């Protein structure tokens, strides 16, 4: 785990792929931005404790969107601290109505708990994190309730899953709608207009060259727009790795049957690969094994990607 003090008393905690990165503002009234995935909550709590904050003292959580890897610690922290939880107004609606689909949890068969969202955020409003002021930028595409947070004074951008340094977060057209690629493009253009020295993404290390990352992401979206197979392939690969991270170890014999029991696998292969389930499965698993992304040992699969 890497920790970086990005602004006075505001710490960036870098996690992996299963858990989103998160942020802690250390003070009498601590603030968290995102809370990781539920199964690794003991690590999340330990990292927060190591920075001198007890989770029962947390005053507020701000989530960049309500996907499982960003809200995993919400419920338990709120139970212990009674903290406020802020989401973009669309995310608040998903949580208020216990919408298991728009949050992706049911679609991707992910573990997550509902919590009480106490505050709806609007695009353009400014939210204080201690003395630091962050402008909320609604950035739909990857997630319809996605936000980025921008601090103009220190030129810091918390980009969440809208902008990563070298890759693009998964695009779930089936849930986010047919226009999601266009929305993602517009969200990137919104970020492009900002003066930024440091980008702190939802996954991966902080980086400085925002323009380069945006141009890479835009190119990928352009590819997706004209190459259906590419979007389908990227989605299948990412979610298979994610599933292995969530489940840690999977019986190799039954993995295909399990995938076929989920909504996402079948529908993705239907959408992009003419319902050739077994063919796609074999192709992806074999390429992962060859590249050492997946290990096959004693009848079990696990991934070498760090959680
Ligand atoms: Fe994420």
Image: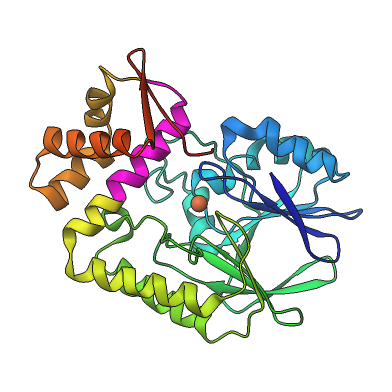
Against 47, residue 118 (above or below) is below
Q: Position of residue 21 (x, y in %)?
A: 62, 51
- Residue drawn at x 26%, y 30% is 259
- Residue drawn at x 12%, y 36% is 279
User: Is 27 contained in the magenta span?
Assistant: no
Determine which quarter of the picture holds residue 123.
Answer: bottom right
User: Is 248 contained in the magenta span?
Assistant: yes
**Is 33 on the left-hand or right-hand side of 109?**
right
Q: Residue furthest right?
A: 28
Q: Position of residue 237 (x, y in %)?
A: 31, 45
What predominant SS class does the magenta segment belong to? helix
**Is 215 on the left-hand or right-hand side of 55?**
left
Q: Is residue 108 visible?
A: no
Q: Residue furthest top?
A: 298
Q: Position of residue 221 (x, y in %)?
A: 31, 70
**Is 281 on the left-hand or right-hand side of 34?**
left
Q: Identify the image quadrant of the C terminus.
A: top right
Q: Looking at the image, which is closer to me, 103 or 166?
A: 166
- The magenta-colored residue range is 235-250
Q: How many marks?
A: 0
Against 39, residue 208 (above or below) is below
């Amino acid at each position: 785990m890497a920790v970086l003090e990005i602004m006075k008393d505001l710490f960036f905690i870098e996690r992996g792929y299963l858990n989103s990165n998160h942020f802690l503002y250390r003070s009498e009234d601590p603030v968290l931005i995102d809370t990781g995935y539920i199964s690794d909550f003991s690590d999340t709590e330990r990292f927060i404790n190591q920075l001198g904050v007890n989770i029962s003292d947390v005053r507020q959580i701000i989530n960049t969107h309500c996907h499982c890897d960003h809200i995993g610690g919400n419920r338990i922290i709120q139970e212990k601290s009674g903290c406020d939880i802020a989401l973009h107004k669309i995310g608040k609606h998903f949580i208020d109505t216990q919408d298991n689909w728009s949050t992706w949890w049911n679609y991707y068969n992910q573990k997550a708990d509902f919590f009480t969202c106490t505050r709806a955020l609007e695009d353009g409003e400014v939210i204080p994190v201690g003395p630091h002021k962050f402008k909320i930028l609604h950035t739909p595409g990857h997630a319809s309730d996605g936000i980025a947070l921008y601090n103009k004074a220190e030129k810091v951008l918390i980009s969440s899953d809208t902008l990563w340094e070298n890759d693009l977060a998964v695009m779930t057209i089936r849930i986010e709608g047919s226009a999601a690629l266009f929305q993602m493009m517009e969200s990137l253009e919104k970020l492009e207009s900002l003066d930024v020295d440091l980008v702190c993404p939802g996954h991966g290390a902080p980086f400085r060259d925002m323009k380069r990352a945006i141009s890479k992401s835009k190119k990928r979206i352009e590819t997706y727009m004209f190459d259906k197979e590419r979007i389908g392939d990227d989605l299948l690969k990412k979610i298979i790795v994610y599933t292995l991270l969530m489940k840690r170890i999977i019986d190799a014999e039954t993995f295909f049957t399990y995938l076929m029991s989920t909504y996402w696998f079948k529908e993705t292969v239907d959408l992009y690969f003419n319902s050739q389930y077994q063919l796609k499965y074999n192709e992806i698993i074999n390429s992962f094994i060859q590249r050492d992304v997946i290990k096959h040992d004693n009848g079990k699969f696990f991934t070498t990607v760090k959680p």
